[in-house]
Amino acid sequence: MSNTSLQEIRKKLAPFNCQLVAVSKTKPVEMILNLYDQDQRHFGENRVQELVDKQAQLPSDIHWHFIGHLQTNKVKHIAPFVHLIHAVDSYKLLKEIDKRAKANNRVISVLLQFKIAQEEAKHGYSGKDIFAMLDNELLKSFNNIRIIGVMGMATFTDNTAQIEREFTALQVYFDKLKNNYFFEQESFKELSMGMSGDYAIALIHGSTMVRIGSLLFGNRA
Ligand SMILES: *Cc1c(COP(=O)(O)O)cnc(C)c1O
């Protein structure tokens, strides 16, 4: 277990006041507990069943982040406890999260995912569809969700200039949403970007939350 990485990452994040989400997908609960014992409380998972299983086995004061693509029919399984859903990319999903949050007597925080990478497979909103979605009047009736920011993934590449362009694009989306839609909402302040390979670049571009897996837990099979 690379405990030095945790200390090193914390040191790098501290001046930016950026939160570390330890991405524990595919890793055993023992490894999560090891970081927990060093005061790490935010963990991220990308599969519903795996998250539900781990949540049941681990301390209840862990803040669980769902960082993967979420299917509407699975929202109900994580709605009782999830801390933040990072990758919301449709009105239908927002509606379902609102419904399931209400059923659990909670308000669930979410981030809107933007497509910033050039890779085809990545989910997320484009600039155009986000404004159409936010202009939907029905959104105002969703009292059990709180949209607190945006999330994105840069292209997996060594090309630093490209990663910088993509993170800058996300920063611009964040500012646009903040200035046009969420200017009265103080809690809209999260910019979730940066992973093991590119988090240093993300920090320079205003990331408030990095999602780091392999650097903390080792490579995944
Ligand atoms: C797996 C994953 C991460 C962490 O990736 P690493 O390169 O291992 O740090 C971050 N964000 C998302 C959405 C992921 O699926």
Image (cartoon, helix red, strand yellow):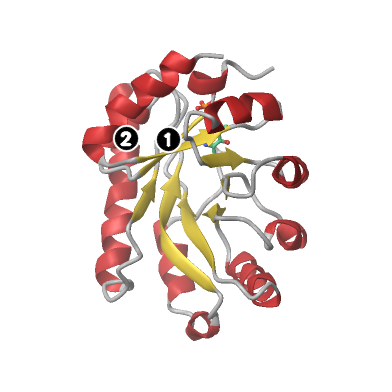
Residue in the image at 56% along x and 75% along y: 144
Task: Give the camera-side residue of 105 and 185.
Answer: 105
Q: Three-letter amino acid code at disc 1?
A: Ala
Question: What residue is pinned by disc 1?
Answer: 154
Of label 2 and label 1, which has the lower sequence position? 1
At mark 2, the secondary structure is helix
The percent position of residue 116, horizontal first and vertical second, equals 42, 43
Give the mark toward the camera: 2 or 1.
2
**Along the horizontal axis of the image, is 64 left or right of 128?**
right
Residue 162 visible in the displayed image: no
192, above or below 158, in the image: below
Question: CA gap, disc 2 to disc 1?
Answer: 9 Å
28, above or below 110, in the image: above
The quadrant of the rendering that contains the N terminus is top right
66, above or below 103, in the image: above
Residue in the image at 59% along x and 68% along y: 94
Question: What residue is pinned by disc 2?
Answer: 202
> Residues at badges 2 and 1 in contact (C-beta under 8 Å)?
yes
The percent position of residue 204, horizontal first and vertical second, equals 23, 35
Residue in the image at 57% along x and 40% along y: 44
Task: Give the camera-side residue of 45 and 14.
Answer: 14
